[in-house]
Structure formats: C-alpha cells, structure tokens
Amino acid sequence: MNLTLKSAHEHPIPFLADLMTRSFEGYLVPIHITEAVMHTMIRRDGIDLTASRVLMRDDEVIGLAMIARRGWTSRLAAMGITSNARSGGVGTWAMGQLIEEAKARGEKEMYLEVIEQNTAGVKLYEKIGFKKIRRLVGYKLENPPVESDVEIEEIDIREVARQVTYHGMKDLPWQLSGTSIMQHTPPSRAFRLNDAYCLITNPEATDVAISSVLVKARSRGAGLSAVLMRALFAKFPGKVWHVSPIYPEEMGFIFEHVGMERESLSQWQMSRAL
Ligand SMILES: CC(C)(COP(=O)(O)OP(=O)(O)OC[C@H]1O[C@@H](n2cnc3c(N)ncnc32)[C@H](O)[C@@H]1OP(=O)(O)O)[C@@H](O)C(=O)NCCC(=O)NCCS
C-alpha cells in the first residue's frame, strides 16, 4: 500500500466538490458540496488549491485536504477521508505531510476548527500537536415575536469588514475575520446602528444566518448589539435565525441576550505552531 498526495489544482472543481461530499460521508452534519459551494469556499475562505491535496492510496482516491492561506498563517479548511479508508492511520499520515509542507512554505502557524463531538477528528489533531484555543458555539431562534421602531441604516458589507478588522478580536476564527467578511456579497446584507454592525445572509430566504456582529469597543456593555439584532428580527419577520458554531463562546451572551438557543454542536478552534 502506497500513500501519496496530489495537488488539488490538477483536478477540476466538480471532481473536488464530489470528493469532498464523499469524504464527509456519515459526518455529524450532512455535507453536500456542489460546484457553486466549492467556488464560494475557495473565494471566501482563501483556499489555495495549489497547497490543497487529494489523498491517494495506490491508484485510488481516498480523501481531500483543503488548505487556506494568509501571510504566515494557514488553515486546514476541510479534511476528509472516504469511509472505506478511515481509522487505518491515513489521517495521521496525511496531517504529518501537511504540516511539513506548511513549514516548507515558510508558514508559522496552522489553524483549524473541529466539531467537539467528532472523536476521531479531535484525537487526530491533538495527536499531531494542535492545541485548543477556545470553544466555538452556535445559536438558533425561530420566528421571534419582536417589535422595534429603531431605525437602522443599510451599509456596504465592506464597511462591516473594515470595522471587524480594526475593532474585532485579533484571533477571531478564520471565517469571522474581517478578511473573510470582506468576501461576502449580495444577496447578503449589512446594517448599522450607531457603533453596532451586523451582516446577515439573504433575508428573503426562510432561514437567515447572522454572519457577523460587532460593537466598537467604546460602546460595548450597553446592549447595542441586542437592539440592532431585534431591529433586524422586526424588519424581516417570520424567519428562522441561525448563528453557525464558529463564534467564540465568550461572545455567546450577545445571542442569549436576544433569546437565541444554543445549538448542541460546538467546535474547538485549534492551532499548532509550525
Ligand atoms: C477525522 C478523519 C479525517 C480521521 O482520519 P483517519 O484516517 O480515520 O484517522 P487515523 O486512522 O489516523 O486515526 C486518528 C486518531 O483517531 C482515532 N480514531 C480513528 N477512528 C476513530 C473512530 N471511529 N472513533 C474514535 N476514534 C477514532 C484513532 O484511534 C487515532 O488515534 P490513536 O492513533 O491515538 O489511536 C476521518 O475519520 C474522516 O475523514 N472523518 C470524516 C470527516 C471528518 O470528520 N473530518 C474532520 C473534520 S475537521
């Protein structure tokens, strides 16, 4: 048995999308990656296909590792092994290779997020030297019965991204960083109330996700984010509101404040010095 890695950029996007779907078969949350979803992941999260790898066992394709890169830092954006090849050491071998490749590229740190309940994933990453930074949590709220007469201003998504870059936590999870937020585009929309900012996915859909919330430091502690979120719930009534489990647990109170319920799945944000 001979394990090798091939550069992902040598493969067409539909092939990579299908391979990612197959590599996440039986996952804790159903994963179906279409060609369009794959393009959005690559653009939004800064995935570098020349550094991403298709895993081979002899001539058989058995997995995929997507690597995102920004300056000295990289992120394991996705890692999956087809079910017939799991639990045999392939993941451990592949991670060792990916770490060596990142070092050879001159990077200094690698980040990842793993679902806390994913025993094999957490074991693998800890074994390879990743340390937990913090727990990441998500929330949900169905059809909040809220009235609000607060006027909110619609702004360019780029403005939210700029504010997150200047005023947000410096080690925010990759997908919440200003650099990632900058890549969001309509039909997502951004709103502002004084020093509070919020980015949401298409509010015409039944399910709407809160993709970013920020209050400038000088205005924190006054409940401004709750006023802004309640104004959004009132502006777009009858929705199911979601916060995906990529928010630092220490930020969770802002969602609890508006009555959102914590999702059972949580993640670990992890990093490894290179
Ligand atoms: C997570 C995944 C990449 C691990 O790859 P793998 O080749 O199965 O991992 P390995 O065989 O190298 O095992 C790594 C560690 O996990 C443990 N492990 C493997 N399968 C396990 C299982 N089903 N349950 C519990 N632990 C398991 C192993 O015991 C090993 O630790 P050890 O060597 O100290 O005993 C693979 O299972 C997978 O693709 N799963 C679906 C997608 C996914 O979860 N991706 C990670 C998202 S961040």
Image (tube, rainbow, N blue to C red):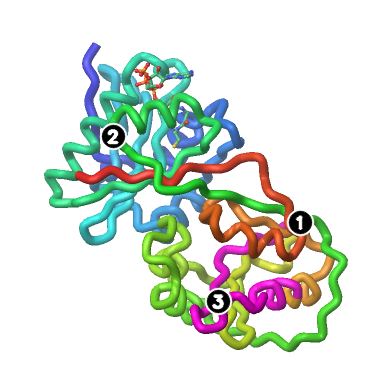
Q: Could you say which is closer to the camera, residue 73 or residue 214?
A: 214
- Amino acid type assigned to the residue bearing label 2 in the image: Gly
Mark 3 element type: strand
- Amino acid type assigned to the residue bearing label 1 in the image: Leu
Give the spatial CA distance, label 2 vs label 3.
Answer: 34 Å
Provide residue 66's location: percent of width, then percent of height.
35, 43
Q: Quadrant of the C terminus?
A: top left
Q: Which residue is mark 1?
A: 141
Q: Would you call the spot at circle 2 few (<14 residues within 10 Å), some (14-19), or many (20 or more)? A: some
Give the spatial CA distance, label 1 vs label 2.
Answer: 37 Å
Q: Which residue is mark 2?
A: 129
Q: Above or below — where is 179 with respect to 108?
A: below
Q: Quadrant of the N terminus?
A: top left
Whether residues under marks 3 and 1 lie with C-beta atoms below 8 angstroms apart, the answer is no
Q: Nearer the viewer, mark 3 or mark 1?
A: 3
Which residue is drawn at the image coordinates 30% and 24% (left, top)?
Answer: 92
Tell me the magenta residue range: 207-230
